[in-house]
Image (cartoon, rainbow, N blue to C red):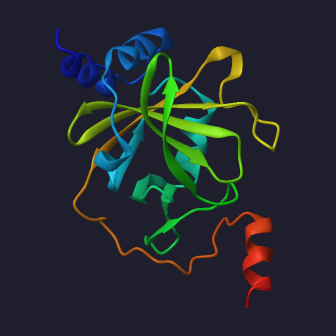
Amino acid sequence: MKLTEVFEEYKSLNFIEDDSKLLDLFDQLGPVSCDEIYSPWSGRSFQTGHWAVKLLRDIKWYGKWFRSKLAAAPLICFDERENLFSNQILGGEGTLWMAEFRGKVSATLIYDCQPMFNHFRKVDDNTLMGLMDEKRLLTGFEIVPADRYYYFYLQRIAEFPARFVTDNQTNLWPVSRRTRMKGR
């Protein structure tokens, strides 16, 4: 079976109990460069029961937006008016770097204010598989409890399906809000 077929099969499953199958698929996929992924992306979680699946559903996560190496928005979410915005609940956005993970150098999103990384592998020109890794969030939560990574996928889109707003204050991390207020 081709890797793209395996990916599509896992994507369609209601629940994936054995995360090692996703890790095996991730390891077989090829790397992707930062330059290849500058675009808006819609995102979805693989249904593994990882706690981040529920969190992202609760904050109405839509996807990610990679504008440049230094401007990467990991949490594009819907607000209460159904506009899209960059949710900075984790204290900012992020940057893209080429980083080695599990034997391959590939595009990696590094969060601004959390010790958290999204490693990407290429399914095809318009589809990425992602794996979230971290040390430990400042809140004390672990992204990788008992060695269980959070798995997700991204699909390139030409444009967002809703208006993107930059002045949304929903769910901003309190430190980010204070810093922005001081600058006024």
- Residue 8 at x, y percent in the picture: 24, 25
Quarter of the image with the N terminus is top left
Question: Which quadrant of the figure has residue 121?
Answer: top left
Q: Is residue 164 left or right of residue 182?
A: left
Marker count (numbered): 0
Residue at horizontal 63 percent and vertical 61 percent from the top? 88
Quarter of the image with the C terminus is bottom right
Residue 162: tell me if it is visible: yes
The answer to which of 3 and 17 lies nearer the viewer is 3
- Residue 168 at x, y percent in the picture: 57, 77
Looking at the image, the residue that sits furthest to the bottom is 184
The answer to which of 109 and 33 lies nearer the viewer is 33
Residue at horizontal 27 percent and vertical 38 percent from the top? 127
Residue 18: tell me if it is visible: no
Q: Is residue 71 above or below residue 20?
A: below
Q: Is residue 158 above or below residue 148?
A: below
- Residue 13 at x, y percent in the picture: 34, 22
Q: Is residue 146 above or below residue 108?
A: above
Question: Which quadrant of the figure has residue 65?
Answer: bottom left
Q: Is residue 24 left or right of residue 99?
A: left
Question: Which quadrant of the figure has residue 89?
Answer: bottom right
Q: Is residue 51 left or right of residue 105?
A: right
The answer to which of 4 and 105 lies nearer the viewer is 105
- Residue 64 at x, y percent in the picture: 43, 53
Residue at horizontal 47 percent and vertical 16 percent from the top? 103
